[in-house]
Structure formats: C-alpha cells, structure tokens
Amino acid sequence: MKRLRWARIAPAALGLVLGMTAVASAEDALTAESVLGDVDTLWTCIAAFFVFFMQAGFCMVECGFTRAKNACNIVMKNAMDLAFGSIAFWMVGFGLMFGATQGFFGTTGFFYGNEDTTSFNWAFLIFQTVFCATAATIVSGAVAERTKFTGYILYTLAITIIVYPIFGCWAWNGLMSDGGWLEGKGFYDFAGSTVVHSIGGWAALAGAIVVGPRLGKYSKDGRINAIPGHNIPMAALGVFILWLGWFGFNPGSTTAVGGGSFAKICVTTNLSAAGGACTAMLVSWGLFKKPDTSFTLNGALAGLVAITAGCDVMSPTMALLTGCIGGAVVVFSVLAFDRIKIDDPVGAISVHGVCGAWGTLAVGLFSSEAGLHQFGIQALGVAAGFLWAFPVSLLIFLAIKHTVGLRVSEEEEMAGLDISEHGMHAYPANIIADGALGTLPAAPSPTNVKTSAEGE
C-alpha cells in the first residue's frame, strides 16, 4: 500500500522539484542579464568620467603653450565650453544627433529625460555629452590669445547645438535610432576621429582664419616669428592627462564589458600614441637638429587622434603604423599652416583636423575592414565632415565678427586677455616676464621657425 502511494506521489514531487528548478534557473538568468547590463552602464559612466577629465588636459596643454598673460582666459574658455556645451547638448544637440531621423538630423529626444529612460540611456547621454565638449574645446586653442570671450561662448553654443550634432547624426545615429546617411553607406568611425576630432579641427580652422593671426606672429617681410608658450611642464602634464583620458574615449566607446574588446582597444590606443610621439620627435630632430619637446607632445596626441576611428578593427602592428604616420603628418601640417599664415597657437587644426582625417582614411588601409571600397567610403566621410563643419563654422564666425565682435583690440591683446577680459592675472603681475606682457618676439633662429608646434 505504501509502495503504491509513493508510486503516485513520486512523479508529482519530481515534477514540482523540476518546475521549481526551472523557475530558479530563469530567475538566475534574469539576474545575470540584469547584472551584466548594470556593469555595462557602470563602465560607460566610468569611461565618461575619464573623458570629462580630458577637459583638464586640454586646459593645461593650451595654457602651457600660450603666454602667461592669457592663462585665466584659457581656463575660462575650457570651463565654460564644458558648462554651456553640456546644457546646450542636453537641450537640443542630443536630440538632433540621436533622435528619430530620416538620415540627416534627429527630430526627437530634445530636453532628454522627460520620457521613459533606461539606466543605460542616462549613461549614454553623459558619455556623448563629454564627447561633444571635446569637439567644442578643440576650437579654443586655435583662436587663443586674441579672441573675445563673448564671441567664443557664442560659437561654443553653435557647435554644440548645430555643427557637431548634425554630422554626428550622419555617422552615429544608428547607435540609438534609425541611422544616418553616412553610416548607411558603411562609413566607419568607431570613436570619432572625424565625428569628434576633425569636426572640431575644421571648426578651429574657420575660427583661426576669421579671427586672424596674433600680433607679431608674421612679419611684413615674410618671417614667421616664434611666440613661445610660458610653461612646457604644464603642457606636458596636459598631454599625459589626455593620454589617460583616451583610455575612456576609445575603450569606452564599446559601452560594454562583455564582448566589448575594450582591453585590446587600450593596447591599440596606447601603441598609436607611442608611435606618434616617437615619429614626431625623430622628424623634428631631423628638421631642427634638436628633439623638439612641443612636437613630441603633439605627436602623441596625433597618434591618439589617428587611432580613434579604427582602434577596434586594427591589429597592434597596424595601430602602431597609424600612429607613426600621424606623428609625421602633424609636424609637416603645422609647418604648412604657418607658411600660409594661419596662426594656430596650439596646433589644434593639425592634431585634430588633419590627423583625424588621416586616422579615418587609415581604416580603409590598415584595418580588418580595409579595401578599395571601404577606403572610398572613408574618404567620402572625411570630405563630408570638412564640407559641413568648415563652411558652416566660417559663416558662424563671420556672423559673430560682424555683430558682437570676435577679436579684441590691439591694446587688449598686448595687455593680455586675463586683465582685459577678466580683470585679473593668473600669476602675480610682478613675475610675468616682459615678453609675456606683450613685447614682440625676437627674430626666429633656424631652430625656432616652426613655432606653432605647441598643440592639443
């Protein structure tokens, strides 16, 4: 009798146990998926914090490679393009870049967060906000030491609301919505060699042209005069901060830990930076008979910018080659811009605009996506970036020039923007050298004719 009862109960008990096991397994799976999602969100936020800290790097580089009398002005520009840019991008830029689109600009997502938003989407918003701030602050260095603070702030609003988000929609909208026209053609820019850096660089070119060169930079007889920066160690610290920040910029663009390959991207990013620094040092050594500090620092940044597009699809060897070529490109680009009398005190146009274009093209040459077809698509993206950012920025700068004004007076430039624009000195006035206070530089020697090498 007992055996019969057990025969009836046992299958039911086994079914109950199996059912409970299945439910527990499903709950475990759901928990694991939830945890992985939270880890991805955490990683994206941490990467955003690294990129945020790059703002300090840009500030230090620009301060170090310009004169002491303009340091407060540079601090203000780097602080306020982040502050104004964060608000403007949240209000308008993010929606234009990632909202529902027909391929050219977004139409939803303005004042983001008033609708149901996932935890990861919040992380994505802050990550993209600091990317936008990077594009904006690139302009600061190219127009340093002679630009009105109000004019600079107005352009910051323009680049974060219009210039950067519209091109970003063309290339990256598919990260959240339907996809832009460029990415639909197969354009590949993983972390923004063109989307962030070239867009900022071409905007910087427009600004440098409209505002004109600094007083004393170019002599009437055609000489290029050196205007040395006041603190090379500060600039070097800025470069190391930026190098560190790039480990959030590139690996963070995976927005994922599992299967994100962010460790490999750290390696390719670092190798490219190292190659850029070594090549720039060697090229400048050959040209000027001395291993030039400013060109070497710029070379590291050139390598970082160049690898940003293809950091996830290049082998370590190809990443090193990309950075080495970038280090050489930046030296000759800086010299070329000086020869055509475009004054870029920190080399931002060359580092970000030119080397961003090079890195984007390198995807079609050295990556796992390489091939003639892909190179053509990459070239299309580079051209589209220039033909959008440069003329639109040129119009914006001209509009600012002819309304509120873009350039300070000669007297204000000679006195320094710290005193004329902000009413204070970055350092005690009695320790600022006569040269920093505005005395025109001496005629260049054969080793300092390159001068504009100092860059972001």
Image (cartoon, rainbow, N blue to C red):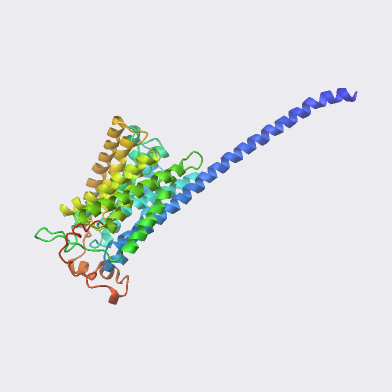
Query: Where 33 sits versus 7, above or below?
Result: below
Find residue 292 and report its image quarter: bottom left
Residue 71 horizontal/vertical position (percent) = 30, 66
Q: Nearer the viewer, residue 71 or 162?
A: 71
Number of numbered tags placed on the structure image: 0
**Measuring 25% from the left and 51% from the top, which residue is drawn there?**
283
Could you tell me if residue 282 is visible in this image? yes
Residue 203 horizontal/vertical position (percent) = 26, 50
Query: Where 61 sits versus 394, above or below?
Result: below
Find residue 195 and report its image quarter: top left
Q: Nearer the viewer, residue 356 or 39?
A: 356
Quarter of the figure with the C terminus = bottom left
Query: Where 385 sits versus 436, above or below?
Result: above
Query: Where 348 sits versus 226, above or below?
Result: above
Is 172 on the left or on the right of 358, as rendered? right
Residue found at the very far right of the displayed protein? 1
Residue found at the very far bottom of the displayed protein? 430
Residue 389 horizontal/vertical position (percent) = 26, 46
**Measuring 37% from the left and 60% from the top, which residue is drawn there?**
237
Quarter of the figure with the N terminus = top right
Could you tell me if residue 94 is visible in this image? no
Residue 60 horizontal/vertical position (percent) = 34, 61
